[in-house]
Amino acid sequence: MDKLIITAALTGAEVTREQQAALPITPEEIGRAADECCQAGASIVHVHARNADGSPTQDKEVYRQIMAAVRARCDVIVQVSTGGAVGMTPAERLAPVTLAPEMATLSMGSVNFGDDVFMNHPADMAVFLQAMQEHGVKPELEIFDAGMLSTAHRWLKKGLLTGPLHFDFVLGIPGGMAGTPEALMYLKAQVPEGASWTVAGIGAAQLPLGALAIVLGGHVRVGFEDNVYYRKGELASSNAQLVARIARISRELDRPVATPDEARALLGLPRRH
Ligand code: KMH
Ligand code: ZN
């Protein structure tokens, strides 16, 4: 089995300081959180930008500041969000890709997102993918529901997507696939040859699906974007606390944790810094 790649989803677009007092919001806070997570075992940070008032933004300048704040502290792989927040325009969401980060997310279809709709029109997805290819950015394919994995297969067959592919199964969003072992096993069985995958369990699904992914040879995403609790009724003290637990479990299961450079090698990312 490959070493474990841990992604820390530090901030997200929806979580508030009222829900999680340690949520990193400013570029400096995100830079510090990224460094702590890297030291705890994360090799990728998935980042979303916020305005000073905490509201979500896809402003390129804020992402530039975040990337600089992270880079000043550590060598972790920065993965920007192109999901942004529900209701943002595709052009708005695409902005950080033009900064040529090492990775960016690419949602593979539309999904109900609680009481909202997270819209991903195929024509917009194609534009996102083309921009990533132009800027040398590796997409992480976000899979919220099974049909999105079928789309990835179709795009692979058509030559729009080229391997090695890397998937993120986001399980437990109200409206998407459930955060259950059965859902993960169903998706895992359909991963194309040579592709890698990670799982982002939402809420209480984060820990059990992370543990399952370690055993199954997948990778794991944790962090406040997906879950603000350490255990039922107890808030996590930091993103790094969630990363450290997954790293600990993986080492106990005899699966070493990848450094950022080891993760680059596993994902086929050129070393750029
Ligand atoms: N905030 C969600 C609507 C991504 O980062 O690519 C979408 C999201 C996905 O977070
Ligand atoms: Zn995200």
Image (cartoon, grey):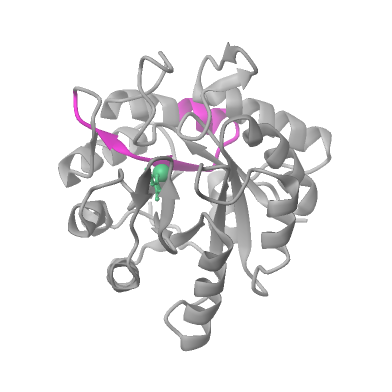
Residue at point 55%, 58% (across, down): 145
Where is residue 238? Give x, y as percent. Answer: 50, 19
Q: How many marks?
A: 0
Residue at the extreme front: 115
Residue at point 65%, 17% (across, down): 232
Ligand 2 quadrant?
Answer: top left
In the image, 264 versus 134, the foreground residue is 134
Where is residue 63? Give x, y as percent. Answer: 25, 42
Residue at the extreme right: 253
- Position of the N terminus, as image quadrant, is bottom right
Where is residue 103? Give x, y as percent. Answer: 41, 55
Is residue 45 highlighted in magenta?
Answer: yes
Is residue 87 highlighted in magenta?
Answer: no
Where is residue 178? Give x, y as percent. Answer: 62, 46
Left or right of 95, for residue 4: right
Left or right of 236, for residue 128: left
Residue at point 67%, 75% (across, down): 193
| Residue 81 in view, yes or no | no
Above or below, 59 against 17 in this view is below
Residue at point 18%, 46% (across, down): 60
The residues colored magenta run 35-52
In the image, 42 versus 21, the foreground residue is 21
| Residue 91 in view, yes or no | yes
The quadrant where residue 180 appears: top right
